[in-house]
Amino acid sequence: MRRDDRDEPFDDLFREIERMMNEMMNGADGNVDFDSSRDVDNGFGMDTHVDIHETDDEVRIIADLPGVEKDNIELECDGTTLTISAESDHRQYDERVSLPTRVNEHTASATYNNGVLEVVFDRAEQSSDISLE
């Protein structure tokens, strides 16, 4: 036995995981650069998360927009898609969120607090039958 495994029992496991990650990332020399700050990213990135919550009465969209000022956010909805456009000093967000059901875009309310955008829509009334005369 080359060392006391009780001191660092996970060393071998971590080394193997690191080796596999390097292999997967084509880092044959063992050095992988995970710094993606030089990549230009238009649209929502890894630091942004969008959730859609649906009830019988409403559809609620919650989106993380870190570093964005309230005045730099534009929202548009056509009843089936919500478009979120926002801009910060370091990036530009432009995302189209497909809604799970048709909504009444005229009933929308939106709040923005500490980097979290919340938009709430009433569900659209089901279309009624049209009588043909």
Image: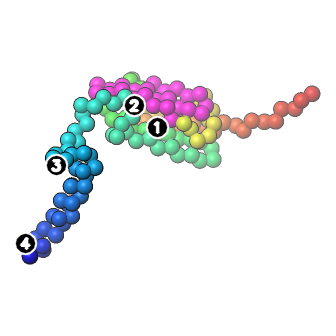
- Residues tagged 1 and 4 counted as in contact (Cβ below 8 A): no
Tell me the quarter of the picture where residue 70 sits: top left
Q: Which residue is denoted by mark 3 in the rendering?
A: 30
Badge 2 crowding class, 10 Å Cα cut-off, few under 14, some 14 to 19, many 20 or more, is some
Q: Secondary structure at mark 3?
A: loop
Of the two numbered discs 1 and 4 in the rendering, the one whose residue sits closer to the viewer: 4
Name the N-terminal-most of marks 2 and 4. Answer: 4
* Along the viewing direction, whichever of 120 and 64 lies nearer the viewer: 64
Q: Which residue is denoted by mark 4 in the rendering?
A: 3
In the depicted structure, whether residue 113 falls above or below residue 92:
below
Callout 2 amino acid: Gly
Q: Which residue is denoted by mark 2 in the rendering?
A: 43
- Location of residue 6 in the rendering, given as x and y in whole percent from the top left corner: 12, 74
Q: Secondary structure at mark 2?
A: loop
Q: Which residue is denoted by mark 1 in the rendering?
A: 118
Q: Which residues are magenta?
A: 74-97
Of the two numbered discs 1 and 2 in the rendering, the one whose residue sits closer to the viewer: 2
* Along the viewing direction, whichever of 86 and 121 lies nearer the viewer: 86
The quarter of the image holding the C terminus is top right
Name the N-terminal-most of marks 4 and 3. Answer: 4
Question: What is the chief secondary structure element of the magenta stretch?
Answer: strand
Of the two numbered discs 1 and 3 in the rendering, the one whose residue sits closer to the viewer: 3
Left or right: 90 in relation to 54: left
Identify the residue at image location x=33%, y=30%.
41
Callout 1 amino acid: Glu
Tell me the quarter of the picture where residue 5 sits: bottom left
Name the N-terminal-most of marks 1 and 2. Answer: 2
